[in-house]
Amino acid sequence: MGRYSFRNVGILLLFVLSTSSVLEAQQPFLSNLSATRDSPLFTTYAAAMERSEFTLDEGFHFVFYDPDKGLDFITDTAGDWCLAFKRGDTYVYLLKEMFQEPVIHASYADIVTYTFQPFRDIRVDVTFLVYSSRMAIQDIEISNMGDESVEITVIPFLRNDYRTFDNVRFHHQRNGVTCIHEELPDGWVLDHDIPFVDKVHDVFMLSEPPDGMTSFYNYSEGAVRIPHGVEPEIRPVYVVRGRMHHADGERCHHVPRPRLKVILNGDKNRILTDTAPRWGSYDENVNRYAFYGIELGHFGEIKTGDDYTITVMCRRTGEMAVHTGVIEDLESKGERQDITFAPMASSLNPPMLKKELSDDGRHIRLSWNQIDPHVRYNVYRRDYETSGVYALLAREIEQTSYTDRQAGNGQIRGYLVAAVDSLGRMGMVSEEVTSLEENDFLSYIRGRVRTPCSVEDLARVIALEKSITLQPNQSRRLRVIRGFAKDDADLERVIQRTAGLVDENLKSYVHHNEKLYSRIPRITFDDPDTEMLYWSAFSLMRQVMLPPEGKCGYNYYVFSREPTWGWGHGGQVFHESLTMLAYAHMDSVSAMNSQHVYLERQYDDGYINYRTGPYLDETIETHGEVTSSAPWYAWQNWEVYKITKDTAFLRDMYASSKRFYQYYVARRDKDGDGLCEWGGHAVLESVRDAWVAVWDEVAWPTHLEGVDLNAMLVKEARALADMAGTLGLSDEAEAWTRRAQTRVDKINEAMWDEECGFYFHVDKKDNDFTYHESDDLKREEIIGFLPMWAGVASREQAAALVQKLTDPHKFWRPYGIPTLAADDPYYNPKGYWNGPVWVEWNALIVDGLIQYGYTEQAEELVQRVASNMIAQLKKYHDFYEFYSPDHSWAGYHKTYIWAGMIARMLMDVNMF
């Protein structure tokens, strides 16, 4: 694993201050890489904090590791930034087509440099910088390493698989293209009144006049895909929605996304699919977070008692899910119905549909493969401008072709075919084909189409071309710049600024990062993979920091900047701020500022809301009580102070932490017995914000005295004692120590079970382990170890806890400590809070093990957690919200701040 270079944080800081010039003189780790696709390197990039903003903020993930993809910088919804080359008749784009795969030489939170060879004698050196939330630069140097002159065409292009590029305009005098792409907000953003830009204006510019500028319906041959309509101004009638799971409980996040079909009252004359418009919402009908939804109002006059059948097919596994329901209450505007996929029971696979347009475009001939000699086929058509429903054109025909002689009336029409068996059962529909004439990039670039038919709307690809001639040993530099704007007026300013970046010195941005990263404690690692994980974790944490904006007078963080999903882009919460205990080693000032955000928003009575952001004060009132965050506030502030030694920060945060503690304990001990229970929206406040075993099968958390909560409050009181003592407030320090000890005694008296050797919640009414049935609160969850972290357990109790912890049938799993014991019937290693490894909770356990002298177990635990994180970094080059304790797997949200705590864990196990 390696060893930390210094014995404690104080010595570390003195060393860093006294030897900063030595550190800066050394070649920084992240500037001296030879990283390949098999290296555990984080490769998502977003603008530096000082050049970032909240509302319009584009980040990019570098896909340099998938043989079947190009060297793309992908986004969540803005389209992907790609680079291809053509030499003679040879077109090179995919990684597997290249003579030499890319090697990354430097990688920081906002910039990456790499080298590759598309052809044997052509070397390409690229620096990619996310200059700001609005602009990114790709600097490309092409070198001829051969003995003969070569002519090569460089092709930067944008590719949008999310929706489309619209309003495409070619600006020959400005060497580029402008267009619009859509970034539809999710329901969380709308519900919380968070500002957003749904139509983003793009600039795609070359440093020299391009030889060609084109746009296409598709990248490759195939049906023209039309995005589902969005009609938020229309009130929803009845939406059926839910989550999609596979049989093992894992959400269906597969790409391509599942296909959906709906029939009302058994009537096969009309069907709905996932391409239908969405009323009253910007949500997709099938989204990346494994949710589906469909508006039944498209069928027209629906009524109470109507039945519907929803069929969903996972296109990755071929599994199906069928749900039949009844409309029970139209006033409710819909219902939730989760679905679970299972292997298909029939042979009615979706036909593979093709089309041919007549020369005049008035007729369309459909053809498809024969599924089975005994099946028939239904053919459907939808008029995109007038309806979201597909109407039956031909019923149960035997032939595998059909001609629509009314296709050319000026409307965009979509066509589907489905197989029907002898019992009248209809299978899943085919992929859609449309009446639009196909126009794809590959056919043009490979010379199969001489003249491109560039499109202004519904474009999926926008390409620039530049042909260059290189003599032996000659190099040529091109620069591609992409900018983003909120509206037409803003667009002109962005165009001007984009042009101004043509000569920007990118080396200065690497040097800036080298200086920033030189503050990070150096650890000598035995394993190069662990070393790369350590440094990558700091890039993740740095990347989510944003500057003061809106209500935030200080810099703050979001959970994740790419993708910018609503929940992850709202602002700070105490449990995510655990990451500051690692990040403060990199940038102590911005870590302290992040904590100050809570102080500036604190209420007069001491309350701090659940979530705090530049445009968000999320209080979540439940039963007349507002929700706060899990009480990790004083302890975080004390830990940050131990790193920074900033007395002014300590003084401010002691006063704030004291007021919050007093507010919290006064309102979370309803029975006045000295033990607290979660309040407000208790599941959210408790951090474990979903159905855990006890919440689901026994009791809502407000009815229990929480072992996790009371352990946190002990840690808070002890941190307040340390803060007061450091500030010279000895009387207050003694009072805090007494408070902590009183709670310690109560926890051990009520919550420790000698028979099990474990800590559990207790019933608020009588402080026992029974709520409904005898001992039904004795569920072994990860929170039972928090008394070690809080210093509540005696040496004997700690020994019993460690015995439980290291039992491989319970918690000592291959990749870390799960949130629920593996022998619990509710256990699911991919089931959110009922099994997966959450890195920050494992960090607390590591802290507890070290406190009680179990250093070998602490180091082994860190190795287990790190090994899965390394495996996922090697596979996907990203960090995740949580990881499986049993499998090489991670889910669900990526680029997630909490995972950065692995850096602190690696520090901690190398300090003893």
Image (cartoon, rainbow, N blue to C red):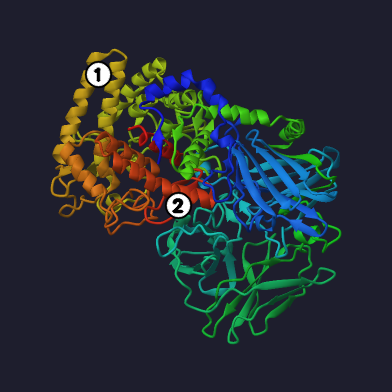
Frontmost residue, 644 versus 11: 11
Label 1 residue SS = helix
Residue at the image point whose x is 73% and y is 46% from the top: 123
Note whether residue 547 is visible.
no
Percent coordinates x, y for residue 410 in the rendering: 78, 63
In the image, residue 168 above or below residue 643: below
Frontmost residue, 380 versus 172: 172
Q: Which mark is residue 890?
A: 2
- Where is the C terminus found, in terms of image quarters? top left
Percent coordinates x, y for residue 459 in the rendering: 73, 53
Percent coordinates x, y for residue 418 in the rendering: 60, 75
Q: Amino acid at mark 1?
A: Ala
Corner quadrant of residue 438: bottom right
Residue at the image point whose x is 41% and y is 38% from the top: 2
- Where is the N terminus found, in terms of image quarters? top left
Corner quadrant of residue 841: top left
The residue identified by callout 1 is 733
